[in-house]
Amino acid sequence: MTDTPTLPRPPAVLTAEGLTKRYGRTPAVEDVSFEVRSGAVTGFLGPNGAGKTTMLAMLAGLIRPTRGRVLLGGVPLSERRPDARRIGASIDACGAHPGRSARQHLRALAGFARLPAARVDEVLVDAGLTHAADRRVGGFSLGMRQRLGLAAALLGDPEVLLLDEPANGLDPEGIRWLRSLMRAQAARGRAVLVSSHLLSEAAQTIDDIVVVRNGRLVHAGAVADLARGGGVWVRADDPELFIRAVVRAGGRTTPDPAGTRQLVEGLEPPAITELARQAGVGLYELTPQHASLEDVFLELTGASR
Amino acid sequence: MSPFTTLVAAELRKLLTIRTALWFALGSVALAGLNAVIVGLASGTLDEVGEKEEALGGMPVLLLFFGLVTVTAEWRHHTAAPAVLLSGRSPRAVTVARLTATTIVGIGLALLTIGAACAAAVPILDIHQPGPALTTAQILSVAGGSALAGALSVMLGAALGGLLRNQILAIVTGVVLYFIAPSLIGMVDASAVDDTPFGGLQVLTRGVHGASHSLLASGFALVVWALGLALIAVLAEDRRDLV
């Protein structure tokens, strides 16, 4: 997770506007709007069955929304032809024939996009699949299939990468590789939208977060904003005087169980420092407490109930 | 290469990098040879030209299932969507390319099958069957009809597969349409069977004996069925989700 709230936010390259998908009378996605910006990894989080895959497929142009639209670079996706250089997707709908080798699979896909065979070798290296390039996909582990899906998504070196639960089946080394790959893509100015049902898995990589539940959006914004607002731990030389000063300034305090520190809420660290100085109270500790992202996520998705 | 040729080439690459075509080629050749042996050796005395021609017929039904299996495999293995995503073309264009590539490979399989049928049947008939030998024109007529029937069978199967997408459903539908529906239709109106695509296949591969249609009319009916189904499959593609 990177924390750069003071930097200007790059523009959105992919925008979902009121996306709705219904199968008959059954709603899969209801009126979801959010933005995915360039140069950032956006986590697309929600419990299983929240509609993440359906939404990703709509963003990739594989499923037609019942209502709403997807804008790619400000232009409705429905008015664009698919373009491997704009969107790359590794989602459930994008698979490989088990009888084909990884190299043959990628070469066939490269043929559709008129990409040179050398590009296939590049993405095989990027995906760490060189050693298995000529093996049949049917013999691949889930992790290797994930890598192959990523390699296929990377073929056109797209501006937007849509990844559906890419960490499924990856070993710890693979997860580390995936994180560095996503960060590297973002560092190159690419937009990455990665879905997961596990916040702990995504939290170390993502800049922005989109949380969905039951096909509806429950939160979209910067991760830094989501984690903010947990209060500030303060250790003062005169706790009683400090508490009175905080209350006068409109803040609230809660002592820790040991009674040695106060959790100050409603005031930012600069204001706390200033009021302590005015009250003549010495401060030995001033530690912003970030709310647990996991707790916020569970609260947003209703899983904590 | 034109954009469409690029799509067809990519689809051909997909078809030729799996073993499906190879297995169907082996199966078709084996069935054609078996048919030639059974008709030529185990059917008693074949006095009529029409009876002898049946030994050359091959088994286009297998090619129908080649089309069905090949196209539905795209949906079974989720390879249809990435092809569209990477192609830069509409799902409709990719589907046309897929049907074209499948038909091209199917023509190859049909020629291979009829070649095997002729190679097996002609010497058997010459040696073991009395009466006049088949003329070159008669052999070419049956061979041409069988090749056309095979190619159109593949196109029919591919179009049906594209419409249904589900492999099991498509195979069951193919079995019902080929083996059951003609019998049911024949119970109502025997001549109507020749209007069905599978009645047309019978005429093309076994000759016009007893059929209500000529070879040309049956061929034309089959072309209409194959192209019609393919057209519906292509037109439907732009109105359906790719997942």
Image: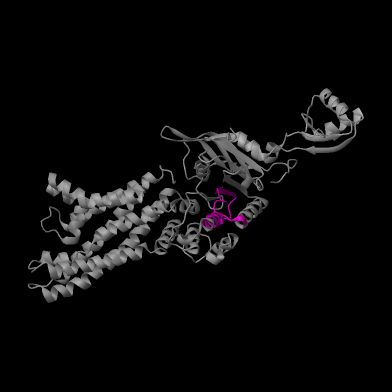
Q: Which residue is drawn at 38% across and 64% down?
A: B19
Can you see residue B224? Answer: no
Which colour scheme appears in the figure? one colour
Q: What stretch is highlighted in magenta?
A: A145-172
Q: In the displayed structure, would residue A239 be above or below residue B57?
A: above
Question: What count of labels does the image hold?
Answer: 0
Q: Is B66 left or right of A246, judged from the image as shown? A: left
Query: Percent position (x, y) of residue B32?
Result: 23, 66
Query: Would you identify the image quadrant in which residue A45 lies?
Result: top right
Q: Is B80 left or right of A9, judged from the image as shown? A: left
Q: Which residue is drawn at 40% across and 52% down?
A: B76
Query: Percent position (x, y) of residue B211?
Result: 12, 55
Can you see residue B202? Answer: yes
Residue at the extreme right of the image, as rendered: A280
Residue at the extreme front of the image, as rendered: A258
Query: Percent position (x, y) of residue B185?
Result: 17, 46
Decide whether residue B110 is among the magenta residues: no
Residue at the extreme top of the image, as rendered: A248
Q: In the displayed structure, would residue B30 be above or below residue A285?
A: below
